[in-house]
Image: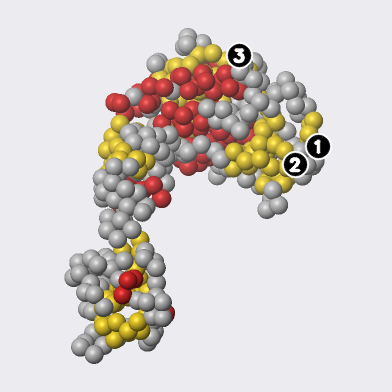
């Protein structure tokens, strides 16, 4: 079970807790849900966005009674238990407005076509004798078995009736929801403007992929990892390259880019070491650096830079992705309805695990077809290969130190 903000059940609510930090992130980003950020877009541009306002169906679906099968539209009262021979009326193709059905007749009808007035059932073509359509004419007749009223008829409003709530405010628009909007005749929809994020990777030790790798350096995986996660969640990402460990250079970069974005996210430079560039660059800003009781991803930064919301994630790749999944993604889900919250499931551990009792541990795992979850890699926050082989996050709440094979855990589908 999850709380209203999507934090796993069992997380303590106090300063430094996962739930407490998520609440702080949600509060920081609350202005992103302002009416001034609402825009109207065509359905083709609304995938992954969320409805600002719920709305009622402007018409019924289906808008008229129609046939569920290719067959014959009939009056059920015209056919006794032993069946009947009925004269064939002109056919009813889909999209046509048929003439009323005369007593003692049957109208060939196609799937989706409007049920003629007077008809109350459809007999599938394979149950007719002959079991193929005939050309209508004076002597054209078909033998049909008895059928109950309503058989193979899709009643008007059987999906949704005019005036019923179609979608609630905050609904994340996927293919099915957009299909419903189109079926109801809507060509455009009111959604929140996509959040634009400035993503900055920091560190003198970090080199962009594709360049030579000097001794002692590492390739930047955080930028690609977080940009992909953010784009998948519907955010618009602005990359500013890799910042050096010079605080003045980082400040200058942020001042240049921040007027064009809704949120700043940095990776690295938020711990208590001697060269934590993000901490140094934020010295004159209302930014707090704290340690959340979570493993990995404990060190976090939160505040504003020149009035722009700021989040500082740790530098290890797994830590920064877990930070995104635990704080930024659920905060946006709660405020804007998009991205859709991660689906929480219960699974049984394939093997035992241990966890620090004072921290909420987030492990990576693979959910198996038999309902068990296999842990991928260990607790360390640098294990990118293990992360790449995972399809769930495994949650071990505060206060739990050991779990045995077969014990249940909460997992979030990735």
Label 2 residue SS: strand
Label 1 residue SS: loop
Name which residue lies at 50% across and 14% down: 287
Residue 207 showing in the rendered view? no
Q: Mark 2 highlights which residue? A: 349
Q: Is residue 3 left or right of residue 196?
A: right
x and y percent of residue 121 in the render? 34, 68
Q: Which circle's residue, 3 or 1, is located before the other in the chain?
A: 3
Q: Which mark is residue 243?
A: none
Name which residue lies at 69% across and 42% down: 347
Q: Mark 3 highlights which residue? A: 15
Residue 103 figure quarter = bottom left
x and y percent of residue 401 in the render? 78, 27
Q: Is residue 215 left or right of residue 105?
A: right
Counting other residues with Cα less than 10 Å from the Cα at mark 2, is it few (<14), some (14-19), or many (20 or more)? many
Depicted 115 relative to depicted 202: above or below: below
Asked if marks 2 and 1 touch (Cβ < 8 Å), the reply is yes
Measured in 3D between alpha carbons, the distance from the residue under mark 3 to the one under mark 1, in whole angstroms, is 30 Å
Depicted 239 relative to depicted 288: above or below: below
x and y percent of residue 278 in the render? 54, 19
Measured in 3D between alpha carbons, the distance from the residue under mark 3 to the one under mark 2, in whole angstroms, is 30 Å
Most extreme residue toward the bottom, as rendered? 139
Q: Is residue 247 left or right of residue 16?
A: left
Asked if marks 3 and 1 touch (Cβ < 8 Å), the reply is no
Q: Mark 1 highlights which residue? A: 404
Asked if marks 3 and 2 touch (Cβ < 8 Å), the reply is no
Q: Quadrant of the C terminus?
A: top right
Identify the coloring: secondary structure
């Amino acid at each position: 079970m999850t709380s209203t903000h999507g934090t796993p059940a069992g997380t303590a609510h106090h300063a430094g807790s996962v739930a407490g930090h998520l609440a702080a992130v949600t509060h920081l980003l609350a202005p992103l849900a302002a009416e001034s950020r609402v825009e109207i877009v065509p359905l083709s541009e609304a995938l992954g966005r969320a409805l600002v306002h719920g709305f009622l169906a402007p018409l019924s679906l289906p808008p008229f009674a129609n046939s569920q099968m290719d067959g014959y539209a009939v009056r059920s009262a015209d056919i006794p238990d032993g069946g009947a021979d009925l004269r064939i009326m002109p056919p009813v193709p889909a999209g046509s407005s048929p003439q009323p059905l005369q007593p003692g007749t049957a109208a060939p009808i196609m799937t989706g076509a409007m049920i003629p007035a007077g008809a109350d059932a459809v007999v599938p073509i394979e149950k007719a004798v002959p079991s193929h359509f005939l050309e209508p004419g004076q002597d054209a007749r078909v033998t049909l078995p008895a059928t109950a009223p309503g058989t193979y008829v899709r009643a008007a409003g059987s999906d949704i009736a005019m005036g019923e709530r179609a979608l609630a405010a905050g609904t994340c628009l996927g293919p099915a929801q957009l299909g419903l909007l189109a079926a109801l005749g809507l060509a455009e929809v009111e959604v929140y403007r996509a959040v634009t994020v400035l993503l900055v990777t920091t560190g003198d030790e970090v080199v962009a992929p594709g360049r030579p790798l000097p001794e002692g350096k590492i390739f930047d995986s955080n930028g690609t990892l977080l940009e992909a996660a953010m784009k998948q969640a519907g955010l618009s990402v602005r990359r500013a390259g890799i910042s050096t460990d010079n605080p003045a250079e980082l400040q200058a970069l942020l001042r240049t880019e921040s007027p064009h974005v809704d949120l700043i996210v940095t990776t690295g430079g938020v711990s208590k070491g001697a060269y934590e560039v993000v901490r140094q660059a934020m010295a004159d800003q209302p930014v707090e650096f704290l340690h959340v009781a979570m493993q990995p991803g404990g060190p976090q930064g939160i505040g504003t830079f020149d009035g722009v919301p700021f989040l500082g994630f740790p530098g290890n790749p797994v830590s920064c992705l877990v930070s995104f999944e635990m704080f930024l993604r659920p905060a946006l889900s709660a405020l804007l309805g998009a991205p859709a919250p991660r689906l929480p499931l219960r699974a049984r551990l394939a093997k035992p695990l241990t966890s620090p009792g004072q921290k909420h541990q987030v492990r990576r795992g693979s959910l198996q077809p038999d309902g068990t979850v296999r842990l991928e890699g260990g607790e360390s926050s640098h294990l990118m290969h293990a992360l790449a082989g995972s399809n769930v996050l495994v949650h071990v709440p505060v206060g739990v130190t050991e779990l045995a094979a077969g014990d249940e855990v909460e997992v979030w589908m990735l």
